[in-house]
Amino acid sequence: MKAKYLMINVLCFMLGFLVAAVLLHKEVPQHYTPVGDIESLDTIPTPQAEERSLPLDTAQPTSEKRLYTSASPIPPELNDEPANNDENKARLLSIAQDIGLDSGIYPDLASYENQDITRLIEQHLLTNLRASQGDVYAQFDEVEHYLEAMPQIASVQFFTDLLTQAEHKGALSQSFAIHLMAQSVEQFEPGTEPLSQMQDIVVATARHSESELVRLSALESLATMSSEQAELKRLLEPFQADESAVIQAKITLLNYHMALADKLNNH
């Protein structure tokens, strides 16, 4: 539900950013160093959309009998102490039942290892999202339920595939997927490789999107995903050349907020 409110806020305030940019540009302290002075991040990897493209025809969905394979390491939460292992398994089985992976489809699901149950759930969610139609929020209901229930379990690879799926469904779906990613970053420790990978995925996705909504959602999410100002400045650098007035207005607002935070911290 949090992501839905975020999306509504983004859509409501997009037009206001342009006016805010004009007003706030004069208020930014002169001593503040703009993000544009930071070294370029052209080395951020570009998502290989051509290689990962999924067919738009949903008549033949991917068989769920094949376990979803992830290049990401198994989250440590899945290999925890026996007591936590059992608790995680119970929660995973509950999620599996909620999304339709019941005992009728997988009679021995309870005997599976936690990481295998997780991969089945993620594969099932991606398959359902690919075939779903209609309201965007309804399409992401199952994914949002999974991430709210066990945000510490979802892998970086799952979020990568989620964005790839959303790309085929349009800008609103892609923007919503980015917000779901931002909601789930609490599972990653600041300064760690998984968090850095998530940030790079968002930056690369936004840089290669023609949609202002997607790019604006990325900027909002990067602000949420960054624990340090220096980190956020680095992530904003690739957007300095963006010709969109809305995007530049958002960057101006973020710069203003960082400058204001600096001023407050120095008093």
Image (cartoon, rainbow, N blue to C red):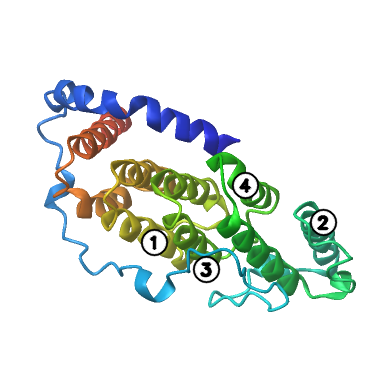
Q: Secondary structure at mark 4?
A: helix
Rounded to the nearest angstrom, the CA distance separating label 1 from label 2 is 30 Å
Rounded to the nearest angstrom, the CA distance separating label 3 from label 2 is 23 Å
Q: Secondary structure at mark 2?
A: helix
Q: Which residue is mark 2?
A: 97
**Crowd tier of the residue under label 3, counting other residues whose Cα lies within 10 Å: few below 14, some 14–19, many 20 or above:** some
Q: Which residue is mark 3?
A: 157
Q: Which residue is mark 1?
A: 201
Rounded to the nearest angstrom, the CA distance separating label 3 from label 1 is 10 Å
Mark 3 or mark 1: which comes first in sequence?
3
Rounded to the nearest angstrom, the CA distance separating label 4 from label 2 is 15 Å
Q: Is residue 188 left or right of residue 255?
A: right
Q: Is residue 19 left or right of residue 192?
A: left
212 shown above or below 75: above
Residue type highlighted by circle 4: Glu
Q: Is residue 70 left or right of residue 195?
A: right
Mark 1 or mark 4: which comes first in sequence?
4
- How far from the left and from the top, in percent, is residue 204? 32, 60
